[in-house]
């Protein structure tokens, strides 16, 4: 039995249990849930396959949404038909086979329980797929072919996603996060569900108008954080527009900088029943976005890795955190570029156990992990890791040291190994894993708060790491999510584009009214 058949059989059994035990009134709206979420760099040699999505089907999907627990108000407001939702770590382009397989399950499961009054379409918006320029647009169009044009679709996205005209057209309601880092992710998803249910219960259905404004700006998330200006004030303008009479919701998408596709650029969308309010709100937000384009800057100091290390070694603030940005797996990097860890292990400061305590998180090395498991904790190991996917900048790194910890069972890494080499604790994983939480370290016997330096493959620090830092610098290291967009070499995005074309003329930021889904 293949993956697709297994998921389908599981989903059907879950639906049977769910439907047979339901005591909800028959007149409640019938609402489906589906989506695939990943951020994919087309500048990385990595390819994401089916298993990367950790797909959930049927009632398992509710585990993604705390606001949809069995006794929640939203759970009681509709008859729910969850299909498949997959969420992958950011990575390389998705194989066409993986995309077709997962989408095929979604379509078959949706067809099982037709018709629907509504559908919650939960995506990221920056998925790249081999042979497709607009995967989310393709996905929602194929879903429309199954559920029809009368079903109300509410789309929830990351603000680093991309909104093509196709996605805008087939979505009746659409929203995205208003914070980066994404501390409001669940709040935004709940807003998408609330808007959907409100429109179904009121009988108002689809908004009468949707305004879409492409903004020719392409910037990395590390330059557009809402922690600092101008992102902070720009996104603060969104809720007041969304609260206006005749408007349902408003959103600004920064877009995704590390894919080379025509849809990659900023977008503003506003939806509602008052044409003038919708158009005016969209144009105001788009103009505000354009007006501050020159003010965007990195959320923390940036410099070369060499200079970052000098600063960290001379600092009395612990832990001093260095973001190894170029191969950041939370933005789409392969996660196995060895350039930075190679440079660290070369340095004389870290050659002896009494040197500055440094934690490096992390480098994948399945063969290294296999050998470490065979040796066991406390044993000595000399083996290579990394550069199995992306060896453009450095070859596999040789790590020699003592195996201090082996931990099995992580959802992403599967197995994690801590090796002490001099004063450096290197985390080697079977599969790539970003390290976001203090517990990611402490469960491995490491105390990041007591380390002199912590180097993480990440861009801007997520809240838990940010709050833990003594100080912080972002190192401009090489990789598939290089912060130097000029060095990446985009060829297929629409030009002119700021900041690649910094002297471009002001664009037309007038609102474009997108046809309703049944008018396409």
Image: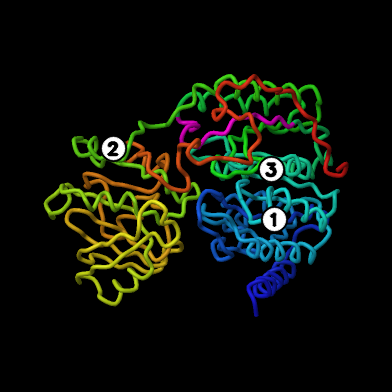
| Residue bearing the label numbered 3 | 194
Say which of 264 and 420 sits in front. 264
Which region shows up in magenta? 212-227
Quarter of the picture containing the N terminus is: bottom right
* Sooner in the amino-acid sequence: mark 2 or mark 1: 1
Vertical arrangement, residue 193 with respect to residue 82, above or below: above
| Residue bearing the label numbered 1 | 33
Which residue corresponds to the image point at 79% horizontal and 45% vertical from the top-left? 200
Say which of 159 and 195 sits in front. 159
Residue 401 appears in which quarter of the rendering?
bottom left
Which residue corresponds to the image point at 60% horizontal and 46% vertical from the top-left? 126
Coordinates of residue 466 in the picture (x, y in percent): 37, 39
- Asked whether, in this view, residue 217 is left or right of residue 518, the answer is left
The crowd level at tag 1 (other Cα within 10 Å; few <14, some 14-19, many 20+) is many
Which disc number belongs to residue 308? Answer: 2
- Asked whether, in this view, residue 143 is left or right of residue 42, the answer is right
Magenta region includes residue 226: yes
């Amino acid at each position: 039995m293949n993956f697709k058949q297994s998921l389908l059989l599981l989903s059907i059994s879950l639906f049977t249990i769910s439907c047979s035990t339901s005591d909800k009134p028959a007149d409640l709206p019938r609402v489906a849930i589906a989506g695939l979420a990943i951020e994919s760099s087309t500048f990385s040699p990595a390819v994401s396959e089916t298993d990367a999505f950790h797909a959930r089907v049927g009632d398992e999907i509710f585990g993604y949404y705390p606001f949809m627990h069995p006794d929640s108000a939203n759970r009681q407001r509709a008859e729910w038909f969850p299909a498949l939702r997959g969420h992958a770590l950011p990575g390389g382009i998705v194989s066409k086979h993986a995309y077709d397989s997962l989408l095929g399950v979604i379509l078959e499961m949706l067809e099982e329980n037709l018709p629907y009054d509504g559908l919650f379409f939960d995506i990221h918006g920056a998925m790249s797929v081999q042979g497709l320029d607009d995967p989310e647009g393709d996905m929602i169009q194929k879903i429309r072919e199954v559920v029809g044009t009368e079903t109300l679709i509410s789309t929830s996205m990351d603000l680093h996603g991309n909104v093509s005209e196709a996605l805008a057209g087939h979505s009746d309601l659409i929203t995205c996060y208003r914070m980066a880092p994404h501390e409001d992710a669940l709040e935004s998803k709940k807003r998408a569900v609330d808007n959907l249910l409100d429109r179904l219960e009121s009988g108002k259905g689809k908004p009468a108008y949707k305004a879409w404004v492409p903004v020719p700006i392409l910037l990395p998330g590390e330059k557009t954080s809402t922690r600092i200006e101008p992102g902070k004030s720009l996104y603060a303008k969104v809720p007041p527009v969304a609260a206006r009479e005749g408007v349902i919701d408003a959103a600004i998408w920064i877009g995704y900088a590390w894919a080379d596709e025509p849809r990659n650029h900023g977008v503003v969308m506003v939806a509602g029943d008052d044409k003038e309010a919708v158009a005016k709100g969209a144009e105001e937000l788009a103009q505000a976005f354009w007006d501050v384009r020159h003010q965007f800057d990195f959320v923390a100091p940036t410099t070369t890795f060499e200079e970052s290390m000098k600063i960290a070694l001379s600092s009395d603030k612990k832990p001093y955190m260095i973001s190894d940005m170029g191969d950041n797996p939370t933005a789409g990097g392969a996660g196995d570029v060895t350039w930075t860890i190679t440079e660290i292990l070369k340095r004389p400061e870290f050659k002896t156990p009494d040197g500055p305590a440094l934690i490096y998180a992390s480098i994948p090395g399945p063969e290294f992990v296999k050998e470490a498991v065979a040796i066991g904790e406390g044993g000595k190991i000399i083996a290579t890791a990394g550069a199995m996917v992306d060896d453009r900048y450095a070859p596999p790194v040789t790590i020699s040291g003592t195996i201090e910890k082996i931990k099995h069972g992580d959802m992403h890494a599967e197995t994690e190994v801590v090796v002490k080499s001099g004063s450096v604790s290197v985390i080697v994983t079977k599969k790539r894993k970003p390290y976001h939480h203090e517990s990611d370290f402490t469960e491995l016997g490491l105390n990041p708060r007591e380390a002199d330096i912590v180097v993480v493959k990440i861009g801007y620090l997520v809240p838990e790491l940010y709050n833990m830092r003594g100080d912080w610098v972002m190192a401009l290291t090489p990789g598939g999510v290089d912060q130097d967009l000029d060095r990446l070499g985009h060829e297929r995005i629409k030009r002119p584009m700021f900041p690649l074309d910094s002297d471009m003329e002001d664009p037309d930021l007038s609102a474009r009214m997108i046809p309703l889904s049944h008018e396409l």
